[in-house]
Amino acid sequence: MSLYNEQNYSGINNEAIKGTAVLSRTFISRVFTWMTLALTITAITSFLWASTPSLMELLINPDGRGLSIFGWVVMFAPLGFVLLMSFGFQKLSAPLMILLFIVYSVIMGMSLSFIFLIYHLGTIGVTFGITAGMFGAMAITGYITKTDLTKFGSILIMGVFGLILAMVINFFMKSSMMDYIISVIGVLIFTGLTAYDVQKLKRIGTTIDNGTAAATKMSIMGALTLYLDFINLFLFMLRLMGGRK
């Protein structure tokens, strides 16, 4: 009787583990689907905007010096969208979260169109491919590793704030050496954050009922997190690769 109970409990436990694994895979799949959609929208918008002079003129002053008012709005609007979705998560509906995420990816494409004026197209393409490979490798690592990355992630998040501070300081110093060091550290930080964020989302996925509005909103926020990891990794890699016009 005791053996039967142990075997029965073991079977139930295995079924529960399989169930949570399915929930997690479904959630992660939705997160990556939204992230891929956003990256695609951003890439297309960025290229089309950069290749259309009349659109680029909207972002730059008529004398060619500095950004126009609309250009400044485009540069800072993505931050506003991130804050809105983050702090308004509980109150915003799932359809509105989706709409905000799509509009955000379009505006990010507009703001990133400047890289086509600074770097050669070949450099951008190669860097994007390398970034995708690094991101994919770290995402898989974060998903399959048994090591708890929580403490590691906390250190990396602190590193992000330090990185921002260093970038602000170097804005005034304009040191090429410091710029190089910042770029290297930025690549390391966002490479590590990719693994950490995927593991965190995997855990969240085990507690999510994928048929609810809350699950949709959470998948959007997860996609936003990974989207930001990818974009930042790409931009720091681009700074390292060089290839300026």
Image (cartoon, rainbow, N blue to C red):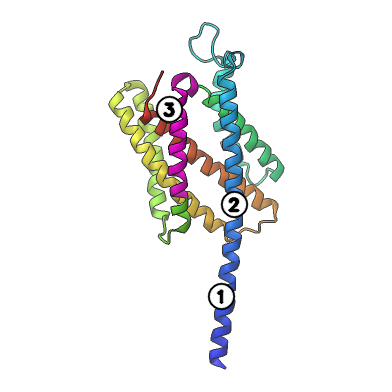
- Residue 122 in magenta stretch: yes
Nearest the eye: 241 or 113: 241
The residue stretch that appears in magenta: 115-139
For the residues labelled 3 and 1, the Cα–Cα distance comes to: 51 Å
Q: Count neighbours of disc 3 (C-alpha within 10 A) and say few if under 14, some if 14 to 19, many if 20 or more.
A: some
* Nearest to viewer (mark 3 / mark 1): 3
Relative depth, front residue between 139 and 85? 139
CA gap between label 2 and label 3 equals 30 Å
Q: Is residue 74 above or below residue 131?
A: above
Evaluate whether residue 144 shows in this view: yes
Q: Which residue is mark 2?
A: 29
**Residue 151, image x and y in percent?**
39, 54
Quadrant in which the C terminus is drawn: top left
Q: Position of residue 170 (x, y in %)?
A: 34, 25
Q: Which residue carries the number 1 mark?
A: 13
Mark 2 is surrounded, within 10 Å at the Cα level, by few (under 14), some (14 to 19) or many (20 or more) other residues, namely some
Mark nearer the viewer, 1 or 2? 2
Amino acid tagged 3 = Thr
Mark 2 residue type? Ser
Question: Label 1 to label 2, Cα distance in Å?
Answer: 24 Å
Q: Is residue 19 left or right of residue 172?
A: right
Q: Secondary structure at mark 3?
A: helix
Identify the residue at image location x=56%, y=36%: 39
The answer to whether the residues at label 2 and label 3 have Cβ atoms under 8 Å apart is no
Q: Amino acid at mark 1?
A: Asn
Disc nearer the start of the sequence (2/3): 2
Locate residue 169 relative to residue 136 in the image: left or right. left
Q: Which residue is mark 3?
A: 123
Q: Is residue 238 inside the magenta stretch?
A: no
